[in-house]
Amino acid sequence: MKAITFHGTGDVRVESVADPAIMEATDAVVRITTSAVCGSDLHPYHGRGAAPGGPPLVESGSVMGHEFMGVVEEVGAGVSRVKKGDRIIAPFSISCGSCEWCRMRLPTQCTTTGRAVFGGRFGKQYPGGQAEWIRVPFADHMCEKVPAGMTDEQVFFLGDILSTGYFCAENAGIRPGNTVALFGAGPVGLLALQSAQLFGPSRVYVVDRVDYRLKLAEEMGGTPVDLDKVEPVAELRRLTGGRGPDAVLECVGHEVPFGQAIQAVRPGGTVSSVGVYVENSIGFPVREAFFKDLTLKMGICNARNFILPLMPLIQTGKLQPTRIITHTLPLSDGPKGYAIFDKKEDRAIKVMLKP
Ligand code: NAD
Ligand code: ZN
């Protein structure tokens, strides 16, 4: 089959790789109908690693991608909930559903898979979803059937970035009338913005520097703050009468906005961070965090838990994840998809790939 493979900084290729097959009785093989490029795919693409000079985040030659959905083509003898022909969506992290952490509803901490992510190099290695086919382990637990009448694009983001955006907003503890600031108007940030609005804030200030992303944030009801025109911490204070936003959402995954989120939030406020920090450690304005009595919540999203609860919010139009899609390319144009998403060319926000 054809797949997007990783070969080092800025180098992803369309290559022929082995077709997936059932390896365990609990597996399914899924024919992928829609895939996408995620901001998390950009970390290895940028050459980021856990330690400076250390190994890249993805093994050279491995199949990239953890956002996918499709149709079940084959199931192992131990699979009973899903069957051939079912349209399914699966979360980006791979979990068994039965270990101690899965039973605590923390599937990203699954000890059976070693916290594996499709296409990642942590834990057990599972090829990714920027491909024509994929092996989905623990299929009964991992796969959720797609309700008839919903398009791929409506459902797709439940597997990762809509769930992540919602998780970010929910963790921020937003109360009706609160002021909220959000760093990063990429796909995750824009879906965090939609999610934050469900909690009734008076304003959501959206900080980024990419004009067309700020424009979409504004169309979605956010108030843009261009960090190339103003210093965001001072500006957020000014916009909130000197006090700072009640909650700050961090959807970038870098030291600078993380520190600025802590500096911007009001005393006793909450910082909710979902940007991925690939490095082992970063600088942290710990003194300010301490003296502010702030609450900090962060983490990898247990997207599995959000797929079913968020589905009706999409069906009723309260969440409109398809609004972030700017490009739908054939899988064979995957390298171009990475390049325009990374460089923010052609007004790219979310790039979908069709095998
Ligand atoms: P993206 O790279 O398109 O979005 C990042 C946005 O942040 C861009 O629009 C960029 O212009 C903006 N930005 C850069 N520096 C900034 C700064 N200093 N202040 C404000 N904005 C700044 O990627 P994305 O797909 O939206 O993903 C965002 C982050 O979420 C990534 O780190 C990704 O790895 C992470 N992520 C986390 C989870 C999770 O489970 N926690 C899941 C999916 C993605
Ligand atoms: Zn992702």
Image (spheres, helix red, strand yellow):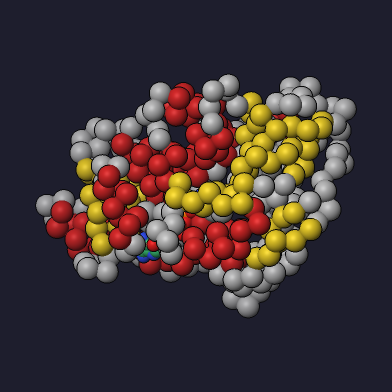
Residue 209 against residue 352 in the figure, above or below? below
Looking at the picture, how far across and down is residue 343, in whole percent?
46, 67
Please name whichever residue, 318 or 108, is drawn nearer the observer in this view of the structure.
Answer: 318
Residue 179 against residue 334 in the figure, above or below? above
Looking at the picture, how far across and down is residue 133, in whole percent?
74, 44
What residue is rendered at 26% in x and 33% in y?
Answer: 200
What residue is rendered at 37% in x and 56% in y?
Answer: 184
Residue 319 against residue 67 in the figure, above or below? above
Please name whichever residue, 249 or 161, is drawn nearer the observer in this view of the structure.
Answer: 161
Q: Quadrant of ligand 1?
A: bottom left
Q: Is residue 264 left or right of residue 330?
A: left
Q: Is residue 225 left or right of residue 95?
A: left
Residue 48 against residue 112 in the figure, above or below? below
Visible residue check, residue 265: no
Looking at the picture, how far across and down is residue 26, in whole percent?
81, 33
Looking at the picture, how far across and down is residue 340, in whole percent?
49, 63
Residue sticking out furthest to the left: 241
Q: Is residue 66 left or right of residue 235?
A: right
In the rendered image, which quarter is residue 4 located in?
A: bottom right
Q: Is residue 129 left or right of residue 310?
A: right
Visible residue check, residue 24: yes
